[in-house]
Amino acid sequence: MTELKTQPRLAPARPKKPTSMLRNALWLFVSLVIVAAFWSVKIKWSALGDFPTQLLKYIGLMLVPPDWSKFGEAFSATILSVQMAWIGTVLGIVVSLPLSFLASRGLAPRVVNAPLRLIFAVIRAVPEVVIAILILSVTGLTPFTGALALAVGSVGTLGKWGYEAFEGVDAGPKEAVRSTGGSTLALIRWGVWPSAAPDVFSFWLYRFEINVRASAILGLIGAGGIGKMLQDNVQFRNWDAVGMLLIVVIAVTMGIDQLSGAVRNRLIHGYWRIPKAAR
Amino acid sequence: MSAGTAGKTGIQVSPAHPGRPVKPRHGAQVGAAVVVLAAITVWAGIGVQINIAAIWENWSNASGNIIQLLQPDYGFFPKVIPALVETLQMAVIATAVGSALSLPLAFLASRATNPRPGLLRATRLVMNIVRAVPDILYAAILVAVVGVGALSGVMALILFNVGIIVKLVSEALDGEDPGALEAALAAGASWPKANRAAMLPQILPSFASQVLYTFELNIRASTVIGLVGAGGLGILIDNVRSFFRYHELSMIILSILALVLVLESVSSALRRKLV
C-alpha cells in the first residue's frame, strides 16, 4: 500500500476499443439496404394511421364474442392439421435418418455426401406450399398431400441438422470403435448414435412444432385443416368464426409446445418437466 | 430413475471386483413409448387418409405436369422480378423492424435479465401466444385490417419474427454467464444499466446470428403469405397455379431457389464471422 502511495504511477490508459473496417463497412451496407427497402417498397405508410382503430374493430368482430357454435369445426380442423404435421414428421424422420448418415463426412464417401447435401439445401429453399402444389397432381387434393409436402420439407431440415449433429460428435468413441476393428455400421451404432441421439430427438420434436405451424398454410391450396377453415370463413367475412379458430389454434399449439418441451427435457436431462421458458 | 438404482445395486453386489457396470434397463419405458407413438401414427394416418394406391392411379396424368415443370418458361422471368423484389423488400423491412422490437422484449422475457417475476411471466405468456399463431393466420387477418398488399405482409412477418427472435435470444440470455451482471449490480448499477453494460455485449453476436437466420426464414415465409393477398411472390404463385401454367410455376420456383440459396450462403458466411 505504502509503496503505491510513494510511487504514484500514471493509471494505465484505457485500452482502445478495437475498430474493424470490415465491421463498419458491413454496418453501413446493412443500413443502406434497410433504407433502400423502406424507400422503394410500394406501401402506403399513411394506412398505418387508422391501423389501431381498424385493428380494434376487427379484434372486436373476431373475439367479442367468438362464434362458440363453430368450436367443434375449429377443433377438428386444428386436429386434422396436427395429424398432417405428425404424419409429415414421421415420414420425414424415416427418410431423413438414413440419408443424414450418408451425408455425414467420415461415414460415407464424399461422392455420396455432396449430392445429398445439395438436395437438402434445395428442399430447404422451397416453401412447403410450393412442394404441395408440385405433388398435388400426383396425390390429389387430400390431407395426405399436405402430409407428404411436410414430409419432403422435413427431410430438408432434418437431413441437414442430422449430418451436422453426426459430424459434431466427440471423436473419442469413434476412434475407439475404429481401433477395435468396427465396421461403418458399428461405428454409427456405437460411436456416433449414442452421443448424437438426444440432439437428434430434440430436432425431431422441433421439426414437429414447425410442421404444426406450417400445416396451417397447406389448407389454403385445399389440403384441409386450419387453412381451409380460415379461407372459407375469411371469404365470407365470418370474423367470429375466425376468432374461434384463432383461440383453438393458439390453445392447441401452446399445448403441443408444452408437451414437446416436457418430452425434450425427459430425453435430454432424464426427467419430466415443463420447460422453464414456457412458464 | 431406474438408471440410478440399477447402477447402485451393481456396485453393491460386487464391491471387490468392479466388473462390467450393469446397463440401466429402460425396456418397459421404451416399449411403452413405441406403443404410444405407433398408436398416434395410426390415428393420424387415418385422419389424413393415407392413400398409396391413388399415387399409382394418378401417376400417368401427373407425369405430364412434371414434364411441364421440368421445362421452365424463361421468358416469364421479367414478370417474376417485381414480385421477387417485393418479397425481398418485405423481408428486409420486417426483419429490421422485428429485430428492433425483439431486443428489449428478449431482455424482458429472460429470467437472467428481468428481476420482476410478474412482468417476466406476463411477457412470456404474450410471447407464447404470439408464437402460437401461424404466420398465414396473421396475414389473413391483417389483409382484412390494412388491405391487400405488402403492408399486411410486412406486419404479419414482423409478428412472426418477434416471436422467433425473442424466444431464441431470451434463451441465449438465460444461458449467459451472470458474473458480469452480478458485478455491475454489486457496483450499484440499476437493472437496465447492468443489462446494457454486462449482458448486451455478450448477447450481440448471437442476436445478430438469429436475425440473419430469421431473414432467411422471412424470404421463404413471404413467398407463402402472398397466397392470402399479402404481397410478394405468393400472389403470383396463386395466379399461375389456378390456371395450371406449370411452365411459369417452375420459373417462379427456380427464382425462389436461386434467391434463397444465394442469401443462405451469404448469411451463413456472415454468421461464421460473427460467432
Image (spheres, coloured by chain):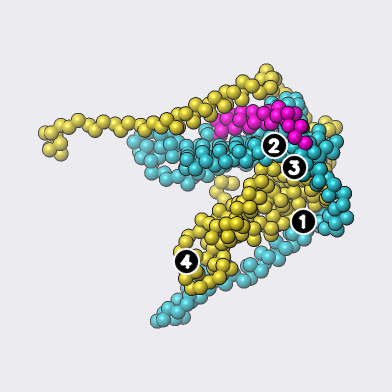
Label 4's element? helix
- Asked whether the beta carbons under mark 3 and mark 4 sit within 8 Å of each other, the answer is no
Label 3's element? helix
- Asked whether the beta carbons under mark 2 and mark 3 sit within 8 Å of each other, the answer is no
Who's the residue at 63% across and 67% down the image? B30
Give the residue pinned by disc 2. B255
Q: Which residues are magenta?
A: B73-102
Which one is closest to the eye, mark 1 or mark 4?
4
Tell me the amino acid under the disc marked 1. Answer: Ala
Residue A43 in the image: above or below residue A256: above
Who's the residue at 55% across and 53% down the image? A164
Give the residue pinned by disc 4. A175
Where is residue A118? Give x, y as percent: 63, 49
Who's the residue at 36% across and 40% down the image? B183
Callout 1 crowding tier (Cα within 10 Å): few <14, some 14–19, many ≥20: many
Chain shaded yellow: A
Q: Chain of mark 3?
A: A
Give the residue pinned by disc 1. B44
Residue B3 can be seen, yes or no:
yes
Chain shaded cyan: B
* Quarter occupied by residue A96: bottom right
